Image (cartoon, rainbow, N blue to C red):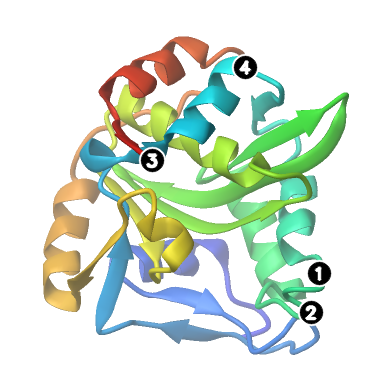
Amino acid sequence: MAHLQPELLLQAYAVGVFPMAEGRDDPRLFFVDPERRGILPLDGFHMSRSLRKTVRQRRFQVTCDLDFAGTLEGCAAATERRPDTWINHEIFRLFIALHARGHAHSIEVRRDGALVGGLYGVRLGGAFFGESMFSRETDASKVALVHLVARLKAGGFVLLDSQFITSHLQRFGAVEIPREEYRDRLQRAIATPAQFVPVDDDWPAVVSLLQDSTQTS
């Protein structure tokens, strides 16, 4: 498994499984195929009133694919709440390779030039597989997610896979679906033409999302 190739990893995503490690210092990988899969419906995205305000104020600088490695490192870093992560050296190597091939993307969130949050994931056709996110300031990862969803909707994507469901993602409208339903949606999504264009300014797409998304308290 230490010599797993990026192309094989893409094949795994295409059939609905994804890699993990027991811990950052464990060199081994294993593939996960949950009975119930978390997805974030792009047409049912929810935003709280406070997050809408934060997004509109543009207090953070948001970029795409300018520091993929830094974003990956941020997601892999230990924190008080999460002393260990599943992103080991092998996963780091594979995703750097996928990024170089144009199949993995990052959203970076900065304040005064410093990276304070972000997320990364993999794309295949009209499917985007969200892998991990991190935040060093309040709302930084949430803002990254808003910008990701805006880009996906603007690019014609039809599936945002969150792998598992958490209370955090449920606030945005994430739901669980059975494995077979997920696989059906996945195959349709992969066959859907979509573009992930790392434009310098995605603000018009974000404004459109602010108008279309559901507001929560």
- How far apart are the two marked residues, 1 and 3, measured between alpha carbons? 29 Å
- How far apart are the two marked residues, 3 and 4, measured between alpha carbons? 18 Å
Q: Residue at x 38, y 40 (%)?
A: 217
- Where is residue 89 drawn, in percent x and y? 77, 73
- How far apart are the two marked residues, 2 and 4, measured between alpha carbons? 32 Å
Q: Earlier in the sequence, mark 1 or mark 3?
A: 1
Q: Amino acid at mark 2?
A: Pro
Q: Which residue is mark 1?
A: 79
Q: Name the disc covering residue 57, or none.
A: 4
Q: Nearer the viewer, mark 3 or mark 4?
A: 3
Left or right of 209? Residue 113 is right
Q: Residue at x 51, y 16 (%)?
A: 202
Do the numbered discs 3 and 4 sit on residues whose CB atoms are within 8 Å? Answer: no
- Where is residue 76 drawn, in percent x and y? 75, 65
Q: Amino acid at mark 1?
A: Thr
Left or right of 177? Residue 57 is right
